[in-house]
Image (cartoon, grey):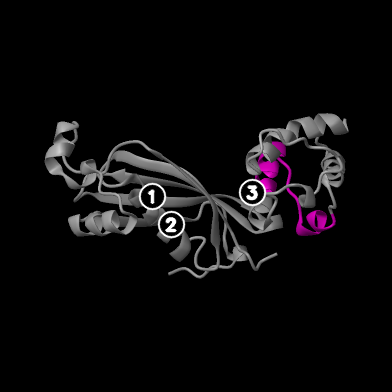
Amino acid sequence: MGQKIIDSITPIFREVFDDPSLIVTKELSANDVKNWDSLNHIILIVELETLTGLFFSTDELVNLKNVGDFVQLLAEKGYRG
Amino acid sequence: MGSYSFSDLSVGMTSERSYLFTEQRVEVFSTLIDDKAPVHVDLEFAKNQGFEGRIVHGLFVQAVISGMLGNEIPGPKSVINNLSMKMHNPVLVGQIVNYKIEITALTPAVAAVSLSFTGMVDKRIVISGKALCSFPNST
């Protein structure tokens, strides 16, 4: 299930960070992506809410360390990819 | 001028403004960005291209939206993260564009505001687009 979610959110990561070849993995974090700054982070969250139809709280987001944590959050909220 | 905080905003809020693209304003904009393409500054050239008159720079037509976002909604406490537009019809020098922006979504987790906007000359749409703004000090 985790990989299915990653596959569904990968196009958004590639568009937001302007990197068509970006490989999204559970281990990927902001430190690994050149354009993952505070402004693009906002765009990323807005686009992910639009894709999934889910809403996130600041508290939920602040503790996420990498994509794997985010995928787990999505799964807990019922998103299946 | 609005001075909203993120928590003051709601989906459906709108703001409207009319802007007259005078000859002087278009001249200043042309000089400012160093774009004196003849379709903007040469009436005969513009007519030979099939236009009724000189046309206003598309980015000038969009720039008014920037002012509305920064001064009205979301207002001075916000910044623009993303702005996209489509030009539907040319705006001629001397025409008035009636703008409307509307909040379409709020993303509290990152204090972001999604908006749509349109610009009309009479009943003809000339520009439409979307904007994403955020409040840097709200999260």
Q: Residues within 10 Å of mark 3 (few under 14, many from 20)?
A: many
For label 1, the residue is: B62
Instruction: State the CA–CA distance, disc 2 to disc 3.
Output: 18 Å
Quadrant housing residue B78? bottom right
Asked whether the viewer can see residue B19, the reply is: no
The label number, if any, that marks residue B66 in the structure image: 2
Residue B137 x, y percent position in the rendering: 65, 68
Residue at point 75% right, 31% down? Answer: A8
Residue A18 colored in magenta in the image: no
Q: Amino acid at mark 1?
A: Gln
Label 1's element? helix
Report the magenta residues as a range: A44-63
* Apparent side of residue B20 relative to residue B84 in the rendered image (left or right): left
Q: Chain of mark 3?
A: A
Label 3's element? helix
For label 3, the residue is: A43
Q: Quick check: A51 above or below B11?
A: above
* Apparent side of residue A41 relative to residue B30 in the rendered image (left or right): right
Which of the pair B39/A64 is nearer the observer? B39
Which of the pair A39/A19 is nearer the observer? A19
Q: Residues within 10 Å of mark 2 (few under 14, many from 20)?
A: some
Tag 2 and tag 1, C-beta contact below 8 Å = yes
Residue A47 colored in magenta in the image: yes
The answer to whether dots 3 and 1 both sit on one chain is no
Q: Residues within 10 Å of mark 1 (few under 14, many from 20)?
A: many
